[in-house]
Amino acid sequence: MDKMKQNQKLNSESDLKVPVQYENKKLSDVEGEADSDEDNRRQLAQPPRLSVCRKILFGLAAPPLQMTSNICGFFFSIFLLEVVKMSPVYVSIITFSGRAWDAITDPLVGQLVFRTDTRLGRTKPWLIGASLMGPVSFFLMWIGLPAINVDGDESKNVQTFFYYFACYLAYCAMITCYHVPYTSSTVLISNNPSDKDGATASRIGFELIFTIIGSGVFGVIISSKRVNEKCQAGGLKPNFTEEQLFQERQSYMIAAGIISAIYLICGIFAIFGIKERVKDTFRQDSFFKNIRCVLTFKPYLLLMFAFLFMSLGIQIVQANLGLYTTHSVKLSSHMSFGIVTVLSVAVLFVPFWYKMADMFGKKKIFMCGLIPMFPCLLFATFMPADSLICYYSVCAVSGLSISVAMLMPWSMLPDVIDDYYVKNGERKESVFYSLYVFFTKFASGISLALSQLALYASGYNSEQTCDQPESVGLALRYLVGPGPVVCIAISMLLMCFYPIDKAYRLKLNDDLIKKFGVSGKSLELSKTAASEEYVESDENSGCVSYNIDCDKARASQVETDSGGSGDSGNGSETKSTDCLLSHRVLTAS
């Protein structure tokens, strides 16, 4: 009987396909080496914890995207309309083309970061280039060239249009080259989930703080010289000198210079403060295969489109708040303070919503937090002119819901990535994040373009400072009221079908522990060596799923060794040995 067991064991060993370096080795030698390798991997999977200083440096690198995109959302259209005197049609072409350009750069940069492997690491080459070029491209957007259609020189008008067109495309490309590798580096700075959560909290905190600081500083500087600040209720039509118009253009350049300096400093923190401590080995799938795998994952699709419609609604409000304040409620001198009110309330309520999400689940808080937007925006449609109390009340309530929009989607995305990881064995963070960022920007582009086309249809005249038709004020009321309400309602409807609630998240945590924790395979192992084990391809989707069940086989062997006998013991031993040798040899190689 013992001889038969030995023969079966040898036969199972000979049937296995192993690398050349293991062909002449005994099973015990291979197991010994693999045990050593697994111990080393466990040690590598638990590096020293991230220090508080490293987490702060990681957070200080975060502000450029949120800070500059909010400034562009609030002020760039106003700059083109009031300072450059550009037609709303041209403004819509510039803003939408910039976001369409993002349709190319976001997934493309995500894929290129996914494949980057240099001596400096995966993300640092991108951060260096974008940190140097990004501030320059942002500053160039705000240089006040001679106004369009003033002297009738068509060639000068074309040159001015293409200047801002090119600058905006350059800014969109550079901010993408900065933010996609930055967010992707979250998974590379540590293997410890607590460290990643701490770094993410630091990132969100500094993003919110610098969004207020940046928008507030920018708004205060331009408001002090803004010509349209003198537009008040009662149809006042002041006269303006060339000197005042020149000072207005200068104020935008000064504000842009300050923001560009903050952008550069944040880039320096990113370059020297982010250290990649985890070596991730990803499958080198094709660009379209990665996109297809991500876009066919149902939880991601539902979350992404819910985020898209929510962003579309909120950014329509954001894009038109300044003009709404000036031409609908006749409170142009309060424009900057209204914007700061919205952002301040949003930031102050982020800890509250974070605590509520921890208690009741992210999905419920996402939906509950958007409900106040409905009465608020509908009231803004009919709000009387020159009413400070009503105006600031609307701004404050809007900030309450915007804080949910700033926090929830980004905190829900890691849940989707974990769900994808459990089901497919890969994470693809850069692809997930790049598409997510793209749809945010895409929503912004659509909102800006639709807003400008609505202004053009209502008869907005860029040559006039305060004297706009009544139809312009009415169009702006509809833009900040019914339009966003419809978008947010669609977002909440999609969220009803989103599967990852609090109970599902808890189950997902158990699945992660069972699959990659208790079994002895750390998350580092599961993303590298384990990605080569028992690969099963789906020919229809091109995606890959993994089915690793070695530990059950080992458990079965223990049971049969202690209580079983005969042929059943032989089968269990063979199965466990096959699994063990295949697993160990593949990870060792």
Image: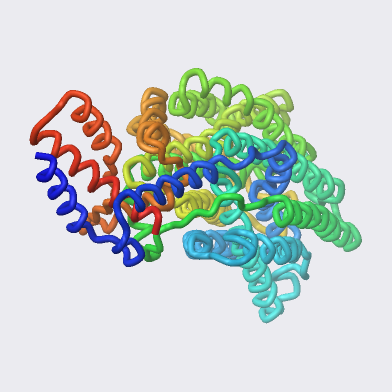
Q: Which quarter of the picture shows residue 170?
A: bottom right
Q: Provide residue 406's location: percent of width, then percent of height.
A: 58, 37
Give 24 or 433, whichever is nearer the viewer.
24
Q: Which of the colour schemes (rainbow, by chain, secondary structure, one colour) is used?
A: rainbow
Locate the C terminus by quadrant: bottom left
Q: Outermost residue toward the right?
A: 243
Q: Write the residue at 41% across / 37% down.
A: 520
Q: Quadrant of the N terminus?
A: top left
Above or below — where is 242 with respect to 587?
A: below
Q: Residue 348: in sight, yes or no?
A: yes
Residue 442, percent from left and from top: 50, 54
Residue at 27% in and 44% down: 547
Foreground: 187 or 287?
Answer: 187
Give me the residue at 69% from left, 27% from top.
Answer: 348
Residue visible at 37% across and 43% down in the picture: 420
Q: Is residue 458 left or right of residue 145?
A: left
Is 583 positioned to the left or the right of 458 in the image?
left
Q: Decide if residue 267 is on the left or right side of residue 111.
A: right
Residue 183 is at least partly visible in this image = no
